Image (cartoon, helix red, strand yellow):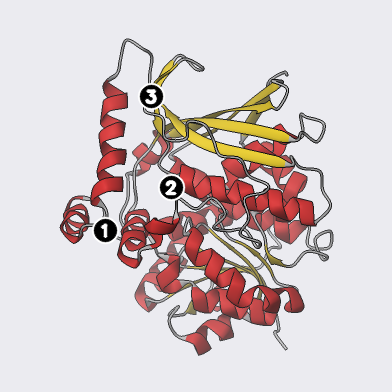
Amino acid sequence: MPDTSFDLILIGATGFTGRRAARYLKEHAPEDFNWGIAARNPDKVSALAKKLNLPENQCFIVDNLNKERVEEVVQKTKIVITTAGPFSLYGENVIAACAKFGTHYLDITGEVGFIKQMADKYGEMARESGALLIPFSGFDSIPADIAAFLLQKEFDQPEKLSIKSYYSISGGFNGGTIATMLNKFETGEYKKMNTPTLLLSQNTEQNIHKPEDAQFFGFDSAISRWSAPFIMGAINSKVVYKTAELMKEQGAPYAESISYSEHSSLGRWYNPVPFFVVSIIVLSITLLGPFEWFRNLLRKIMPAPGEGPSEEQIENGYFKLLAVAEDQDGQKASLNMSYPGDPGNKSTVFFLCESALCLAENSDKLKTKSGFKTPVSALGELLVQRLSTRGLKIISGNK
């Protein structure tokens, strides 16, 4: 039987995002919270432990491709969080071990097709062991998941609810994010991203209606700003749809049919420059990503794994989200959400670590939940309340 002497172990702790997550836990975890770090390189683990003043018995050397070693580490803890991506390359053994031994799991992946494969393969095992597995617990896809969850509550079980989210962001890419994006093209997962039902158990569109302008490029009169499709929208929409399916399975009220789309908010009418720049980037990645020469070019000019923006860039970044919902009768509701700091490097760490701490603090209340869940279907109001008291700003509008 697992000894679960640790409350949490962070896998991938020496990577760019992992180091930030370890620092966050050091600063924000309760004093009596027993947590540790794990990674492949002993020298890097030792250096990080020294920097954080962590004792040797809180450090583990683990290669995610070594199944036996992964199982040894997973059995030592109640919760695993991992930042070691691409997850389709380095995640399966961790997920399998958590499902096998009843260890709860959170990650920051946006690899929807991979998670669908893992849920099909290990979902039943996780339900039997009591493991609660919560992928998408970073900037992909907690803001979207929470926005849709809160907005649908503004209506009285609507038959048809359409939600549009507009993001304004400032930040940079880290090497892990770039590697994951490139891996999606190399494995062919990008071909599946136009399938809205990709994460759903029944693979049916009966609870989804198609967004009218998800691929809109131009001046959006609804917000009086230039707009282009948000690059993470294909990921986040599928998480929202999965939450809708899971909430209904749990008997929780949710819209009968839902559509969700994401857009970048890119400046007033008199300044179209950001719109053209972002549109070129989005179209270039979409059209040229399948070509090896383009991926090799990105590897040369973009950060490598373990690298990322400067601390100043990360702290000066932000994300702001305006989400607007409309039901079948034309009734509307909206909310604004924001968090200071680079969304892909600071917000992601905040969401991941606070979600894990929320799970740890409320484990008794969540005993009835197991298997693969989305952040909202797993943690619901508990997560919203926790994030709101720790720096996430959420302001609801009126219908």
Q: Quadrant of residue 378?
A: bottom right
Front residue of this view, candidates 210 and 264: 210
Kind of residue sitting beneath label 3:
Leu
Q: Secondary structure at mark 3?
A: loop
- In the image, 35: left or right of 348? right
- Residue drawn at point x = 39 percent, y = 40 percent: 314
Q: Nearer the viewer, mark 3 or mark 2?
A: 3
Q: Is residue 158 visible?
A: yes
Disc number lying in front (1 or 3): 3
Q: Earlier in the sequence, mark 3 or mark 2?
A: 3
**Which residue in the structure is indicated by mark 2?**
345
The answer to whether residue 5 of the structure is visible from this angle is: no
Callout 2: SS: helix
Q: Secondary structure at mark 1?
A: loop
Q: Which mark is residue 266?
A: 3
| CA neighbours of label 3 inside 10 A, class few (<14), some (14 to 19), many (20+) | many
Q: Please name the amino acid that badge 2 sits on.
A: Asn
Compute the Cα span from label 3 to label 2: 21 Å
Q: Position of residue 375 (x, y in %)?
A: 65, 53
Residue visible at 30% across and 55% down in the picture: 307
Residue 219: quadrant of the picture: top left
Q: CA gap, disc 1 to disc 2?
A: 15 Å
Disc 2 crowd rating (10 Å Cα; few below 14, some 14-19, many 20+) is: many
Give the percent coordinates (x, y) of residue 189.
40, 61
Q: Which residue is mark 1?
A: 304
Q: Amino acid at mark 1?
A: Ala
